[in-house]
Image (cartoon, rainbow, N blue to C red):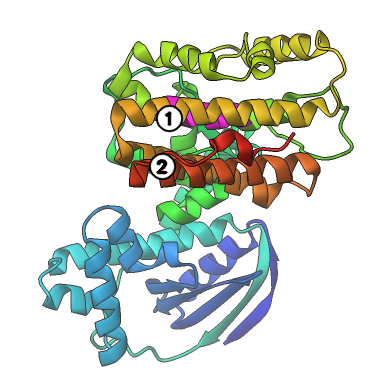
Amino acid sequence: MNLQGDFEGLTLASILQLLCNDQKTGVLTVTCDDEQSRVFFEQGTIVYASASLKEARLGYLMRSDGVISAEQLQRCLSLAKEEKLHLGKILVEKGYISLDTLKKYNTKQVEAILYNLLFWKKGRFEYKDATLNLKGMIVTQLNPMKLILEASRRIDELSVLQKFIPSDKIVFKMSGKVQSKEEIKLNANEWRILSLIDGTRSVRQVINESGYDEFAVFKIFFSVISSGLIEQKDEIMLDDQNNQNDYSAILTVFSDIFVSIKNFISDELGDRTHSLFEESKLGLSIEYKQILAGYHPDNHKIANLQSISGAIGQMEFIEEPKMILICGFTEYCMLVLKNVGEILGSQPLMTILEGIEKVLEYVKKYQAGSKEKSKIVNDMKAMIDNIQSEFKTGKKSKGGILKLFSK
């Protein structure tokens, strides 16, 4: 028997049910955009499944759970390709996993693929009767009806979760409300997801990079949102059409940068963290000191915006105030980083700079071209290069860093 056509909604579940009830033996191929999955039936029972996405692959699932290391996975993938053998067999032969572990993760892989399939709202399917060659394969024995019922439950629960996370394009960041990592009590899966939430990755990117299925990631997102650990990142629009006196987009970018610094150093410096940001203002040029006098990363964004807007409004004869503000924030960031480097040393400082570069990459990738965007990215990258050079060599740059920034 051959079946093919388009599907929407629960039609795919009906197809699985039909193949189960008719005790079919063959292969069901399902495509949606660039994704493709294949489900193998043996007398109405699902015995295997494969998918094009890497997060559904056997080795990726094991690596995500810490069963094997990235090095072990890469080594076995190369051997499997050279010897044209199944990855699972190589992993068992090398002693990296047991046969029972392989069977467990093989079933987990098939379930992940099928749950992902049943989340698809539309696509194309084709089923063909075929004699399966299962020799040497680790097969599963999954009842499609049981999977369909569980998938339906997950879909209903996911619809509730999506009210809190309406789009997988949303970007979340750490809220900064938890003062110490010792206060956070999470399981291994939650820590894995939390480690990927950095203010630059979208929910979809976190799903793809975590190796976990969509339902599991949405549940973890809901959990850490409810705990106050993360919050949605403010949408920013750096463009030349904005009001010349609206500094909110610039403030959002630099606040993300300062919060990333603060989150890194708070465990080491404790209460000293707050005063470090205040003390760093002492080295600012006079006009920047006036503009940023009331700014602090711990303040609410509205309070910071009002303080900056008020300070700039009181200054006379300022051309292009946004450019001046970017210069001020960049100089302030430089002074904070230098103080951090003096206290914690060069290695922690280099890690902090990597975090800042991620924020800048997000701005560069997702913001439309504008003078504001170009100045923030270029000035901050110049500042980072200077800091790296100074703390790696231990030498001060000639002429000082302020010459790097034009108003």
* Quadrant of the rendering where the N terminus is positioned: bottom right
Residue at image coords 52%, 13%: 282
Q: Is residue 145 above or below residue 393?
A: below
- For the C terminus, the image quarter is top right
Residue 72 is at least partly visible in this image = yes
Q: Which residue is mark 1?
A: 338
Q: In front: 159, or 78?
A: 78
**Which secondary structure type mostly characterizes the magenta part of the structure?**
helix
> Which quadrant would residue 170 be assigned to in this image?
top right
- The x and y percentages for residue 137 are 27, 81
Quick check: 362 above or below 130?
above
Q: Do callouts 1 and 2 mark residues in contact (Cβ within 8 Å)?
A: yes
- Disc 2 residue type? Glu
Amino acid type, mark 1: Lys
Mark 1 element type: helix
Magenta segment, which residues?
254-264
Asked whether the viewer can see residue 231, the reply is no
- How many numbered marks appear? 2
Is 81 located above or below residue 359 in the figure? Answer: below
The residue at which mark 2 appears reads as 390
Residue shown at 43% from the left, 78% from the top: 40
Is 255 included in the stretch rendered in magenta? Answer: yes
- Residue 404, given in percent of the width and then of the height, sits at 62, 41
Q: What residue is drawn where x is 31% and y is 64%?
A: 107
Q: In the rendering, at what x and y percent does residue 297 appear?
A: 54, 18
Report the side of 272 relative to 229 (left or right): left
